[in-house]
């Protein structure tokens, strides 16, 4: 029969073993330290989440289907969209001229158009950008967006509604009228890059992994959390969310990790190439022109919707919503935000 000493030794050995196992377990499951974020940026931890449409999202469009579980590495993302003040600092430092401010070269432009496209009148071949027409009184077909969009000569990031407008006292508004090339130039100067569609959705989810909105699943909280269109689009907009058109950044509460305005206000450019259906990571990085929209130039994915999004029209103020963006185009409701990785920041050091 084993002695009492033997049982005592056995119990001590078992206790030591349990303590070691517990210590190992704690060591394995303890969270990694959060890297120190650069000024104006938020850390998005590595995570697994559902990219694309969520199964209970009744507003999801075919291009968002189907939702798939994906993994995202950790990265930093701007807490807000790039503002007029931030972009102005870049322009002052570099002398950069945006695409919307440059003279139009018809010989170059026609290379991106279907063969045989007639040359427009010279009065139209002037620097400018697309501007939303605020005076629309009626529309005959919601598929004909030319009824509320206008090419306006002299419209650019400095003059968002045309040559008579300005961004005076609007330093904290998102910079708009930005083409893809403009966003890339800013990123090169700031040691940043554009987010992929997957990264953008990971950031928008915050601490969620399958939310429809940045605040969860409640569509009735849109007006409290995002700048969108309320009323009859595009005729009447009732500013129930506080703003009729573009709003300053940080006008609404951030998501669960501290990122502002990822839904509504201004669409955000990503680095992912667009196709007519939701492609996960690999296809996004390969990229090709969308046959569905008959594009004659590369398209990128834009995310988040804008102040023009309405439940009766596009309802793109959802995390999975996505639209194509022609790389050489710009408008008064499209901007961007940037991301950085620890490797990028360490390399600069």
Image (cartoon, rainbow, N blue to C red):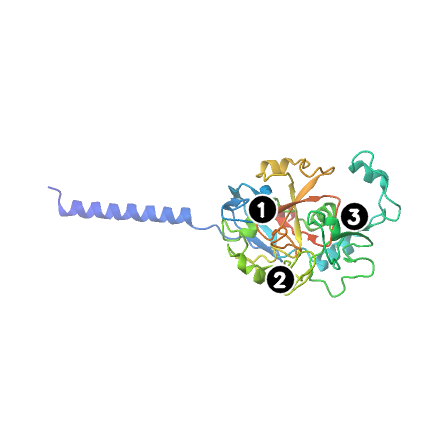
Q: Are marks 3 and 1 in contact (CB under 8 Å)?
A: no
Compared across the picture, whether 211 is left or right of 101 comes to left
Judging depth in this view, the residue of 145 and 299 nearest the camera is 145
Residue 316, relative to residue 277: is it above or below?
below
Looking at the image, can residue 97 be seen? Answer: no
Q: Residue furthest left?
A: 1
Q: Position of residue 119 (x, y in %)?
A: 86, 40
Judging depth in this view, the residue of 257 and 188 nearest the camera is 257
**Looking at the rendering, which quadrant does residue 223 occupy?**
bottom right
- Whole-angstrom CA distance, mark 3 to mark 2, is 27 Å
Query: Which residue has dot 2 on it?
Result: 250
Considering the numbered disc 2 on the image, is that residue within a helix, a strand or a loop? loop
Who comes first in sequence, dot 3 or dot 1?
Answer: 3
- Whole-angstrom CA distance, mark 1 to mark 2, is 21 Å
Looking at the image, can residue 12 be seen? Answer: yes
Judging depth in this view, the residue of 93 and 157 nearest the camera is 157
Compared across the picture, whether 24 is left or right of 259 comes to left
Q: Which mark is residue 16?
A: none
Q: Position of residue 63 (x, y in %)?
A: 60, 42
Q: Are marks 3 and 2 in contact (CB under 8 Å)?
A: no
Circle 3 residues within 10 Å: few <14, some 14–19, many ≥20 = many
Q: Position of residue 73 (x, y in %)?
A: 54, 44
Quarter of the rendering occupied by the N terminus: top left
Q: Residue furthest front?
A: 140
Circle 1 residues within 10 Å: few <14, some 14–19, many ≥20 = many
Query: Which residue has dot 1 on it?
Result: 199
Query: Which residue has dot 3 on it?
Result: 99
Considering the numbered disc 3 on the image, is that residue within a helix, a strand or a loop? helix
**Looking at the rendering, which quadrant does residue 226 occupy?**
bottom right
- Whole-angstrom CA distance, mark 3 to mark 1, is 26 Å
Compared across the picture, whether 336 is left or right of 23 comes to right
Circle 2 residues within 10 Å: few <14, some 14–19, many ≥20 = some
């Amino acid at each position: 029969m084993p002695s009492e000493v033997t049982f005592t030794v056995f119990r001590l050995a078992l206790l030591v073993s349990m303590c070691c196992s517990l210590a190992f377990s704690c060591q394995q499951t303890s969270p990694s330290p959060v890297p120190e974020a650069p000024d104006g940026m938020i850390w998005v931890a590595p995570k697994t989440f559902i990219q694309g449409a969520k199964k209970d999202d009744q507003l999801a469009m075919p291009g968002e289907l189907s939702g798939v579980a994906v993994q995202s590495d950790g990265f930093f993302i701007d807490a807000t969209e790039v503002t007029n003040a931030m972009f102005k600092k870049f322009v002052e430092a570099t002398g950069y001229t945006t695409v919307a401010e440059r003279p139009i070269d018809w010989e170059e432009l026609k290379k991106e158009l279907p063969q045989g496209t007639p040359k427009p009148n010279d009065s139209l071949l002037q620097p400018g950008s697309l501007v939303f027409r605020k005076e629309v009184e009626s529309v005959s077909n919601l598929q004909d967006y030319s009824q509320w969009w206008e090419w306006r000569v002299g419209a650019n990031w400095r003059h968002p509604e045309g040559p008579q407008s300005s961004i005076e006292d609007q330093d904290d508004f998102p910079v708009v009228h930005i083409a893809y090339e403009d966003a890339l130039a800013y990123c090169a100067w700031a040691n940043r890059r554009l987010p992929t569609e997957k990264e953008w959705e990971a950031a928008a989810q915050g601490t969620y992994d399958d939310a429809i909105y940045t605040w969860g699943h409640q569509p009735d909280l849109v007006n409290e959390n995002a700048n969108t269109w309320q009323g009859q689009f595009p005729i009447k907009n009732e500013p129930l969310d506080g703003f009729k058109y573009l709003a300053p950044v940080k006008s609404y509460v951030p998501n669960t990790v501290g990122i502002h305005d990822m839904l509504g206000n201004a669409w955000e450019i990503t680095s992912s190439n667009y196709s007519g259906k939701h492609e996960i990571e690999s296809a996004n990085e390969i990229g090709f022109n969308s046959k569905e929209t008959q594009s004659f130039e590369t398209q990128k994915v834009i995310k988040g919707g804008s102040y023009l999004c309405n439940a009766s029209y596009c309802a793109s103020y959802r995390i999975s919503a996505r639209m194509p963006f022609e790389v050489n185009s710009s408008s008064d409701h499209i901007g961007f935000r940037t991301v950085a990785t620890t490797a990028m920041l360490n390399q600069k050091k």
